[in-house]
Image: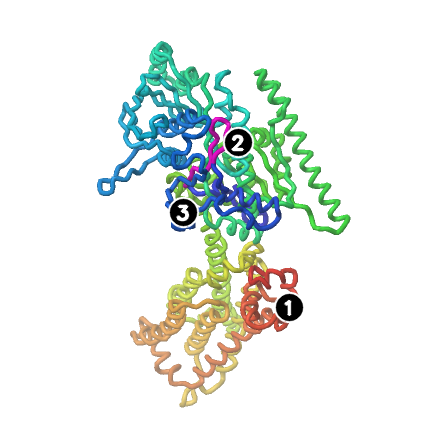
Amino acid sequence: MEFLISKLQVATGTLTSNSMEFVKCSIAGTAYGRGMTEVEVALARRRTDGPTDDIPSDRLSHDADTRGSEKTVKGFNFIDERINNSQWVNEPHCDVIQKFFRVLAICHTVIPDKSKGSGEISYEAESPDEAAFVIAARELGFEFFGRTQTSISLNEFDFKTGKRVDRVYQLLHVLEFSSSRKRMSVIVRNPENQLLLLCKGADSVMFERLAKDGRAFEVQTKDHINNYAEAGLRTLVIAYRELSEEENKKWKEEFPKAKTSVTLGRDALVDAAADKIERDMILLGATAVEEKLQKGVTECINNLTRVGIKIWVLTGDKMENAVSIGYACSLLSQDMKQIIITLDSPDIIALEKQGDKEAVAKASLDSIKKQLREGISQIQSAKESSSSVNKGSIAFGLLIDGKSLEFSLKKKFRKTFFELAVNCASVICCRCTPKQKACVTRLVKLETGKTTLSIGDGANDVGMLQEADIGVGISGEGMQAVMASDFAIAQFRFLEHLLLVHGHWYYRSISMMICYFFYKNMTFGLTLFWYYAYTSFSGQPSYNDWNMSFYNIFFTSLPVIALGVLNQGVSARLCLKYPLFYREGVENIFFSWPRILGWMINGVISSIIIFFFTTNSLINQAFQRDGKVVDFEVLGVTMYTCVVWAVNCQLVLAVDYFTWIQQFLMWGSIALWYIFLVVYGSLSPSESTTAYKVFVEACAPSALYWLVTLLVVICTLIPYFSFRAFQTRFSPTYHEIIQQVEEALKDTYSELPLAVRGKLQPLRERLNNKRDP
């Protein structure tokens, strides 16, 4: 989850794409796969504090579109001459390698689809990692090509004969993956009539189910898994065991009963039955697949944090994996101190092995309390030391695992945890459950009072998306997140466009539209008030009833609606080039009380100018050729004309981005007023009342009417024009600064106005790079 410390809080459940590639593996205690992932390159850059040009190009793990003329296979990016091209047969443990890839080719729920035209086989999988495993097995000599309800067919490379042979495995049972089991198994009978249990699962549940004589490669495999996790790879442990006919027969009687149970504890019974046979396994190795960072994630996060958005990441990944991805996408930096809160201490682990739940809970509470206090003390000490030596404050990153988060969200620790988190530059919560994601989002929303935004792509992000003020779903691992969200995007990087471009546009447009409604209604209403006061509140109206009714319907409303819908202020290119535009919303520049009151004062000034200039110019003056002076009908039409012209022309000064629709509606509204005067005034006196031919016979032939209209409108626009000119020169907004920057980039920095240079000085480096000033 993410959260914007200044105005918005963003919560994200995903920074990676939904495509996975098989890049590394550990078999029989030997690590295979020489390619470097995106995260490994970022880690190497962080450790060397420089470029990675010295890394051999053949070790880089590339995307399919960057590997030149090489044959590329989606889901497979494995580089190792010891394994590729059937060279694994020369390895010391080639029999273990064979069993390893057989498990990958058999233990899954993938459906093969053979193309009738080309004969190529594609795979339909429930998850991208399963597809990556099957593709990897195929590319390394174990092609899965057929499946029925009772069998799985493989085309294998036999290392004994050196030929490819078809083998059919009888499929007896499938023990499906679940979030509680964290593993999947199949029971098959091979062509040699052996009963085999093939299993793959998380290391947290697999190592404890190994047999004593099946742990030959445990130490090396654990080391490799830790290295893979640091490299941002997702790992699974691969194991198997041979079953006896008697054991299988006995288990077959118990498992169907649990599976067909209709009690509330059916899932527990199924898990218990599966647990009885998923034991005493022999370790083969571990897989490592890369879930690539989505395109543009790093740039998007950099721009979001640059405008004051604080990002929290809630993920189900292991801490090592999450930390590595954090470095790769710039959530964590080399100069950032890490505060790690975890319950993986030796004392608590020892208590867990003893099975004393009460002692474990008490020790966990004490540990969390101590770690939270130490974290806060560490931040306070850093702030005091940095202020005493006049140095910049040290940035902190908070890392917390799921077990620790469960205790931190309890009522007694909630505020302490939040105090620690908001003082950290980045927060990464690992091994989070969907409920914990929602709870953290609710905590941030309630404690800060800020607007929260959550973004995720899976069903486990639904609670978080619904809890936040704004939910953004990414169409990735299904449509659950999209269905539960307020906005839907295709990739994480589009969040930058959603917030920095559309967010800026609509904040600016809606704010200006509301302020403008205040202005135009006060301008219109106060002219009535001045008229009533001028006539000693006699009750004689200055405007015709229909004129008053149509003011907010036809003559002034359409341009303002176009302002709210179409006004952009600046182009999308500039919004992305200068994320500083978003600060206008964070600082509430366009919808603050000074801004609202300023527009209201402008309305008061405009009404005074329109009324008094009009009355002083017309009353007691010869209006027509016969020497007649104006009456209240002519005075009312003249004032109304000045109001319509003034409030519509005010848009020319207020709007920076005009479309032909806005132009058409603005000038069309003014033209519609004259058309209405002619049409309505041509009706019978009983229907048009005070407007009867007042424009055609009285106003239109008089040069004074047109001259007063021109002069009054110009005088009405002068105060706001003067204010804008003064503000642009001496107190420019971000928008005006960047407009002048774009012009000044063509010339020299010294030619900028003094006020603009003063605001740009702290960010001069970015200005020189033509980036966000």
Can residue 152 be seen from the camera position used here? yes
- View extreme (bottom): residue: 626
2 vs 1, front mark: 2
Judged from the image, the secondary structure of the residue bearing numbered disc 3 is helix
Q: Is residue 550 above or below residue 502?
A: below
Residue carrying label 2: 224
Q: Is residue 429 above or below residue 509?
A: above
**Where residue 34 appears, x then y in whole percent?**
49, 39
Between 412 and 385, the residue placed more toward the observer is 385
Badge 1 local density, few (<14 within 10 Å), some, or many (20+)? some
- Badge 2 amino acid: His
Mark 3 near mark 1, Cβ–Cβ under 8 Å?
no
> Does label 2 or label 3 sit earlier along the sequence?
3
**Where residue 352 appears, x then y in whole percent?**
58, 19
Along the horizontal axis of the image, is 641 left or right of 577? left
> Does label 3 or label 1 sit earlier along the sequence?
3
Quadrant hosting residue 420: top right
Between 95 and 12, the residue placed more toward the observer is 95
Disc number for residue 64: 3
3 vs 1, front mark: 3
Between 449 and 217, the residue placed more toward the observer is 217
Quadrant hosting residue 726: bottom right
Query: Who's the residue at 35% across and 18% down the image?
Result: 259
> Does label 2 or label 1 sit earlier along the sequence?
2
Query: How far apart are the alpha carbons under marks 2 and 3?
Result: 26 Å
Residue 655 belongs to the span the image colors magenta: no
Residue carrying label 1: 755
> Start and end of the magenta stretch?
19-32
Q: Locate the C terminus and report the quarter of the image it occupies.
A: bottom right
